[in-house]
Amino acid sequence: MVINLFKPKDSIDPGEELIRTSTIPLTIPGMLADARARFAGKVTYRQKIQGKWEELSSESAYQQAQDFAAGLVALGHEKGDRVAIICENGLPWVVGAFGNAIAGGVWVPLYIELGTKEVEELVKRSGAKIVIISAKALERLEGHLGSPEHVIVVGSDETKPGKPPGFLRHGRPGLIPFDQVASKATDDSRAEVAKRVIEPEDLATIIFTSGTTGGMKGVMLTHKNLMTNAESTRRKSQAEEKDRLLLVLPMHHAFPFIMFLTSTAAGLELTFENDLLRVSDRLQEVKPTLFIAVPALFEQMYRTILRRAEQQGKMELFKRGLRVVDVAKRRIGVNLGRLVFREVHQLLGGQLRYAFSGGAALKPEVAQAFFKLGLPVLQGYGLTEASPCVAGQTWNRRKFLFSNYYEDHVGSVGTPVDGVEVDLIDVPEKEIYVKLHGEGELVIRGPNVFAGYWQAPEETARAMAGDWLRTGDLARLDKDGNIYITGRSKYVIVLDSGEKVVPDEIEDHIGAIDIVEEVCVLSTQRRNKTQVGAIVYPNVEATLAQLADRGDDVKEATIRAAVQQELDDLAKKMAPYKRVSELMLSDRPLPKTALRDIARGMVAKPDSFDVERWKTSVPEEEAPSSEPEPDQESAATA
């Protein structure tokens, strides 16, 4: 049984109260019509393509979506039909998603980097009658899209400037250019669109999650799920019409998708950018007031700031600035970071109110580093099954500048968003009990909780505890309702002694070691005893430098010895049962989810370590994604 700790017995249901007071209609078409009425000709979406800005206002987005919906209906689209999209973020995404919603369809966003077999399986599993795909993706995935009735192609092949891709030049049957869909609309199809009634409980999207646990499950979200969560997100983020948001995360994931919907509902100016090498340029051009990213990108941004200071010969000045900020905060209680590091803020556009991190846990030291720069990086928490936002830190300028509130709460993902209730339950199979340990599995309840897994009723039942959604995450709650995620209940290692090891905690410590690039802590068996193991992908540059300083040859034995020494030094500072008993070296980066955290369920124990392959490997976040635009600076200055 779940007893909510923060809801008085006679209080109003927070989900019902959220719906009653919401400023956002409960369906996507309703929200789009409302945004059109309130924001009219205001530019809402922007994207720079080959050096030229393309824009859509709320009015033009509404009109183009209506035309696209009528075109889909003319092609045979019925209410409830699934439409898959395999495409980079951009204006076609806006028109396609809203057009499909207006027609009463179900949106199935698929990650553009999925393998051919995965794409084929998911298109088939979803029963998608129509696939919208970018020309670039189709070059790779042609022949692996199952048997949809229509394939709608976005854009032309960028490798052949000025030419349409081969499959369009040769008039392949069943392939339709995206720009021609609206032209297929008829008076009858427009009348049919006008007659279709979209209800809050209608299915809006199926989002297939890879997640950190492996496997692909289709999460079914209704219009009410999404729209109530968009309202909750708007309130928590304090997003307003005057705000500008730069979106760099792919919208097949629920976190950026809900920010896209929230931006539309609140009338923000939303700029899309798909190339991480161009983020610096976009920040300076767009001058966003809000920025969202995953922890890996914030870590990369901070490393780039340090590298820039080093290259300009200003590292000592930078360190002196950090000391000034630190002393001022301790002595007079004021954060001077924005004044001391004005140049850094200008690189980020100069107008950021705050940045928001989601998708994975943000390392406390990364948050603290940005705090000293005068840039608040707040953290939130969610999961696709919750549409996805569950909790987030609330921005308060006075608290950031004149108190240690955010420093004292670093590691917290904040309090629940409006309309969402949270609590903790016991995990008996892992011998974790809330009353004994002060932590348990986090469960949530609210109008944002999903409608179930696509064609998987048994999986859906396992995800619920009564009317509460089981998150699978261990957490603790403080007296003010702040949530602290402590690990995944599924991956807690229970030793033979009965002691419990949370991999996330050990990974945070190991990950802070200079010569460690990536790490995954897991359970291992040795002589029939459960022990703590760690797969480590060493940082190439730092490890080679350390070996050179020692005068050691570069070979597996010396690399292993260097990492093992660091682990031994770390073990002296931790409880003995948390010591890593088995070290495994990986010669390549560990597998990632789309949001670039370790896909724990896909990590395989390495059986060898090839030194040459390791030396030439490149961490995923540093791999270039495309050539820079001709008129844009290509340096990856965050």
Image (spheres, helix red, strand yellow):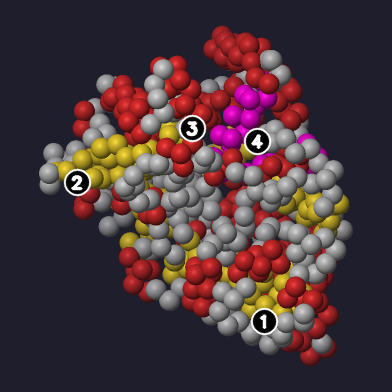
CA distance for labels 4 and 2 = 45 Å
Decide: is 58 above or below 411. Answer: below
Can you tell which of label 4 and label 3 is closer to the viewer?
A: 3
CA distance for labels 2 and 1 = 51 Å
Q: Residue 394 lies in what quarter of the image? A: top right
* Of callouts 3 and 1, the N-terminal one: 1
Identify the element where label 3 is drawn. helix
Specify whether residue 299 is painted magenta.
yes
CA distance for labels 2 and 3 = 29 Å
* Left or right: 465, with 415 as reference point: left
Q: Which residue is mark 4?
A: 354
* Of callouts 1 and 4, the N-terminal one: 1
Dot 4 amino acid type: Tyr
Q: Tell me if I can see residue 477 in this picture.
A: no
Identify the element where label 4 is drawn. strand
Report the front residue among 343 and 67. Answer: 343
Q: Which residue is mark 3?
A: 540
* Of callouts 2 and 1, the N-terminal one: 1
Q: Position of residue 318 (x, y in %)?
A: 64, 16
Can you tell which of label 2 and label 3 is closer to the viewer?
A: 3
* Left or right: 480, with 158 as reference point: left
Kindly identify the residue that appears in the image at 80 percent across and 54 percent down: 49
Q: Which residue is mark 2?
A: 525
Can you tell which of label 4 and label 2 is closer to the viewer?
A: 2
Q: Position of residue 378 (x, y in %)?
A: 56, 37
* Of callouts 4 and 3, the N-terminal one: 4
